[in-house]
Amino acid sequence: MSGLPGRIFVIAGCFGTLTQSAPAQSLQKLSLQGSGAVLFATRKDPNYDSKTRLGFEAQARYTFARFSLGAGYQRSTVFAFADNPLTLALSFAFVEPRVVLMAGSGVAWYLAGRVGAGEIVCSTRGDCPDQKIRLGFGGGTGALFRLSRRLSADLGGQFFQAPALSGPSGSVSSGYAMLRAGLGIGL
């Protein structure tokens, strides 16, 4: 299939896929999701060790067919010192709108945004200057896999700007790439 008829067929097929129901979205309106995450700092800071870090997030999600809206909390270690047990973690409350772009039998591909507020938290109080709560935002993509009528798996990634550590010498990088894997259960 080449030329104009082939293109029309491909466009019609894509449109047909987008107008189908989203079988991998939760069949229940309300769902809860927990995820493990791996974060990568996008810029190194000479005073901190910016290696890959682990974290978690939890969210409640309300589904309107292809569109869903989640609200949750993320906690992820983002920086550590080379010869000091002190760690710095991102504590972040967020709202995450999500739209399913394509859905097939048991899998759905989505785009998601994220906006919220949070701060950097030190593992030992008093070792860091007081941090202000700041806004953060980001976006990404992922896939939902329906495991059963109430259970789904979520594999996704995103980039986001989050609150930075502030101190006398300025702020530490606040851009992160995140990969996450989670399970959602419909209520």
Image: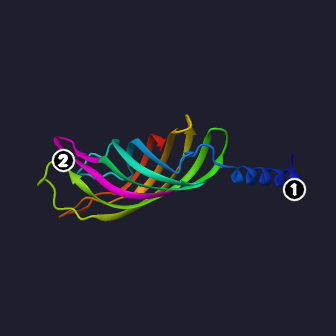
Which residue has dot 2 on it?
Answer: 123
| Residue 152, percent from left and from top | 52, 39
Secondary structure of residue under mark 2: loop
Q: Amino acid at mark 1?
A: Leu
Q: Amino acid at mark 2?
A: Ser
| Residue 53, percent from left and from top | 33, 42
Secondary structure of residue under mark 1: helix
Quarter occupied by residue 126: bottom left
Quarter occupied by residue 67: bottom right
Query: How many neighbours does mark 2 have within 10 angstroms: few (below 14), some (14-19), or many (20 or more)?
Result: some
Residue drawn at x 29%, y 53% as measured from the top left = 91
Residue drawn at x 27%, y 48% as measured from the top left = 79
Q: What stretch of residues is rendered in magenta?
A: 78-97
| Residue 153, percent from left and from top | 51, 38
Asked whether, in this view, residue 55 is left or right of residue 110, the answer is left
Which residue has dot 1 on it?
Answer: 4
| Residue 127, percent from left and from top | 13, 53
89 drawn magenta: yes
Q: Seen from this angle, which residue lies furthest left?
A: 126
Q: CA distance from mark 2 to mark 1?
A: 61 Å
Closer to the camera in the image, 120 or 18: 18
Mark on residue 172?
none
Closer to the camera in the image, 61 or 55: 61
